Image (cartoon, grey):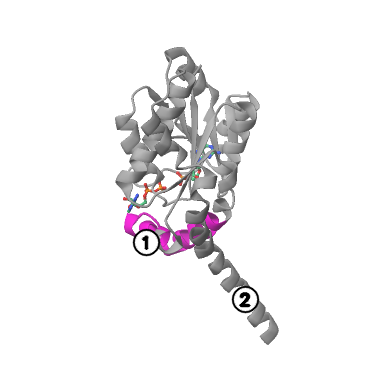
Amino acid sequence: MANVFIISAPSGSGKSTLLNRVRKQVPNLEFSISYTTRPPRGTEQNGREYFFVRRPEFEYMRDQGEFLEHANVFGDYYGTARRFLEKAEREGRDLLLDIDVQGAAQVKDKLPRAVSIFILPPDRAELERRLRERGQDSEEVIERRLREATREIENYAKYDYILVNDRLPDSIAALEAILLTERQKHAGKNDRELSARAESCRLERVRERLEPILQSFQKRLLMAGNRAGESHEAD
Ligand code: ADP
Ligand code: 5GP
């Protein structure tokens, strides 16, 4: 039976960078290409990053039960086609899903064996820096992504593993260790060094590291709340 790995992260955390590297290093991984109603960005190509479809087509597929999960993210539909799981099963490969927190919850409900991984940036300022450095988004979109990140990050505790993407080589090694350790578990094997590395991404092990990260996001929320309160008082 195929292992199913779910990866979620606030935009700009470095998820694509990590996944691209790990996909080259870990064999036998099938990467699910999602369907979306959002238009392509930059150099994105239909059938490579996503299958870009119009709403009626998406709704038709949804009504036919073709999706393993689907969700509305930032006002557009996104969905994982069941056929990717079937293909992975048929070919004896593992499946990697890059989906948001809503989709992750749906997949966990349907496939409790799925392993979920949440990727976090080292703090809010670094997330903002990475979004700007990527140079893909307007100022308005960056602001929206930062707001969304604060909301998404609140879901970290629902995931099996939490990976703080600080130094890229460490993160690549940690993600690889998680995938390989989970694979070994199913095969009844255990490489101690690998599993120790994977275990270092469990919630109880990263709790202390998480505190300042969460604070860096929440502080902004509190400050924004206070500012709203002040202007209200001044009215
Ligand atoms: P996501 O897929 O999560 O939206 P990207 O992979 O596009 O994020 O990464 C956002 C930006 O951050 C890119 O410019 C990328 O090169 C950079 N980046 C990714 N990981 C790291 C890291 N560990 N340290 C510094 N920069 C990083
Ligand atoms: P983007 O439009 O920036 O590529 O992705 C926006 C968000 O949608 C990301 O959090 C990404 O993980 C999520 N996403 C991409 N594909 C799917 C999918 O098939 N299902 C769900 N639920 N989320 C998806």
Badge 2: residue crowd in 10 Å (few <14, some 14–19, many ≥20):
few
Main SS class of the magenta portion in the image: helix
Q: CA distance from mark 1 to mark 2?
A: 25 Å
Work out whether 105 lies above or below 81: below
Q: Residue at x 64, y 82 (%)?
A: 230
Examine the rendering and report whether any part of residue 46 can be seen.
no
Label 1 sits on a secondary structure element that is: helix
Q: Residue at x 60, y 42 (%)?
A: 158
**Ligand 2: does it lie within 8 Å of the C-beta at label 2?**
no
Label 2 sits on a secondary structure element that is: helix
- Residue type at mark 1? Arg
Query: Percent from the top left, x then y, of residue 217?
Result: 52, 62
Find disc 2 in the rendering and name its residue.
Answer: 226
Examine the rendering and report whether any part of residue 222 can be seen.
yes
Find disc 1 in the rendering and name its residue.
Answer: 129
Start and end of the magenta stretch? 127-150
Residue 162's disc is none
Q: In the drawing, does residue 231 fall left or right of residue 117?
A: right
